[in-house]
Amino acid sequence: MRRRKIAFITSNPNSIFAQRLLKGVFSQSRVYGFDVLVFTSMVQVCHFLKNYLVGELNIYELIRSPEIDGIIVDTVSLTEDHIETVRDKLLDIVKDIPDKPIVSIDMSFGDHEIALTNDTAAFEQITRHIIGTHGCKDICFLAGPKDEDVSFNRLEGFRSAMRNCGLTVNEDRIFYGIFWYSFGEEIAEKVANGEIALPEAFICSTDYIAIGLVNRLAKHGIRVPEDVLVTGYDASAEAAFNAPTITTFIPLTSHTAADAVNIIAQKIAPESGKRPVALSSGENLITCRSCGCKDNKDDIINQFDLSLMMKNPNFGEERVKNEITLNRLLSSYMSEQINSAETPDRCLENISHQIYLLRPYERFCICLREDWGDHESLLENGYPERMKLVFDTKEDSIVCSDTSGVFFDTDKLLPYLDGGDDEPMVYYFTPVHYIQNALGYAVLKRRLTEKKGLDEVFSLWLRNIETGLEMIRVRNKLMSFSEKDALTGLFNRRGMDRWIKEKLRTDEGSAVTVYIIDLDGLKFVNDNFGHKEGDIAIRTIGAALQSVESDAEIAARIGGDEFCMISVCGVPADEKQQKIAQMIEKANALADKPYPISASIGHASGKLLPDTLDALISKADEDMYCNKKLKKQHRS
């Protein structure tokens, strides 16, 4: 039976905000028995390398898939630093899929439904702490965008607490901006130059605003908490590691994400009814140095533990086997192993040796476009209609091959998306690209109950994969330069030898015919019309050979005026030779030169064996010279 599937669209999934949302989506989806498909870029939408960001954001093109029943959008992450282009791009995409329910979390997303976090109570508690514990009365509030519901709700919590404590809200002490460092820095500059009078405390609507404010104030000699108190909101790692540490609050965004699943469920599975959200809240206010309280050591330790920097784990413990730290990744020398591969299949094999770094997982796949290895092929937007599964691994088996990859329709997302699992799963879809060039995508499958998400280890692991694949493309490009004749575009002798080796591996013993084609009168053309015209004559012969070349044949320029074609396609030798001669005659007529462009042709047939090809080439060469001699005799 097919499971219903909810898509969750986010970016930078290692952020604490995205992790909390995923926790709520996973928990509630499991209640309904939904699979979750996470489509995410691995970097923030405000990433400084814009070409790289193009390759990352391409992953969202996959949400057009008919496999998806409903969509939840993490609009906050997708508009970070007030970037709106990604949200606008997604709005354009979902216009093509109007029949699916879409819910945005905490911010507007077109005219689609919004699931809002109850921030009002949180900011009441923060404000009461600043007033009751620290005795502040002159308080500035730094809100987000004025027209966003989330800004209104947070501000309303501040106003409510001020009223309940008998204090008047001074509207001149409320400032609107964006939820990012730059807003806090802007306010700090205005305080420093006297445009804004220094209050007793700042209550900021995000940790990032608070950090920007605190650190910029310090540059102007205004100390926190000695001169002014500051609080944030979000309980981010940045807040815990800042100096001073930032008083903050763990938002109930996990509950909001679970509510979003409920909204989707009522539309795609109304028979299920509305299920209660079973997530614990705990103590959410985290008091730290920035408000005058002591550092919260438990929070700092927890955030440090999440930083994945353990250097010497005890591998004797069972739980450590799946605790992959950044140090363990760096110690694997993964990049060196993958980048040393000379062929696509060897590259994929080397990747398989590093798959342990993704534990725990149920399955991991790499899907690439068919021409990903072609150094001249670039793709910046979307994916082709068909993709190729080149890497597919479960804990007990690994299949990896580019040459025998499994093709499937891209809108199916994977060949096996409905795999008959006994419980709902999460599929993380992440882009595989090099800078802006889309190569394909990766899919990591885990149980919904698995707490480990897409962390920095996964992000760096994936970048190693992308660099390894690009190295194959670079090798192909260098190989092309060394194996191609620059004048004609045909293979040279080196390229022909490599083709022969490959054919001996795949078609040894097959019938083969070798054709030698020698351009007539090249010296006469060079001496009487110039070497430029001689080059034209050579290119004309090369183009004629390319026009009759099939997939089971190779045409090469093996000397100044000499060409070779090797065929294992089964076409009768005389018939093929006549076709080559006809194309050369046609090319001569089209060239319309004051000199004839013609060639003498010879051939020899036999079996494709390691010790026969040189003899066949010599025999075909002799046959060619016989024909050239007869041609001269006929002219005389």
Image (cartoon, helix red, strand yellow):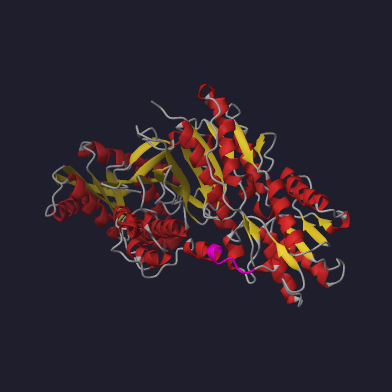
The quadrant of the rendering that contains the N terminus is top left
**Relative to 469, is 192 above or below?**
below
The residue shown at (56%, 46%) is: 21
Q: Quick check: can you spot residue 511? A: yes
Outermost residue on the top side: it is 271
Magenta part of the chain: 294-299
The residue shown at (57%, 47%) is: 281
Q: In the rendered view, does 442 fall on the left or right side of 131?
A: left
The image quarter in which residue 243 lies: bottom right
**Relative to 39, is 492 above or below?**
below
In reply to whether residue 325 is colored magenta, the answer given is no
Q: In the rendered view, does 118 fall on the left or right side of 315?
A: right
Outermost residue on the bottom side: it is 221
Q: Position of residue 146 (x, y in %)?
A: 79, 48
Q: Which of these two is toward me, 504 or 346?
A: 346
Q: Which of these two is toward me, 403 or 592?
A: 403
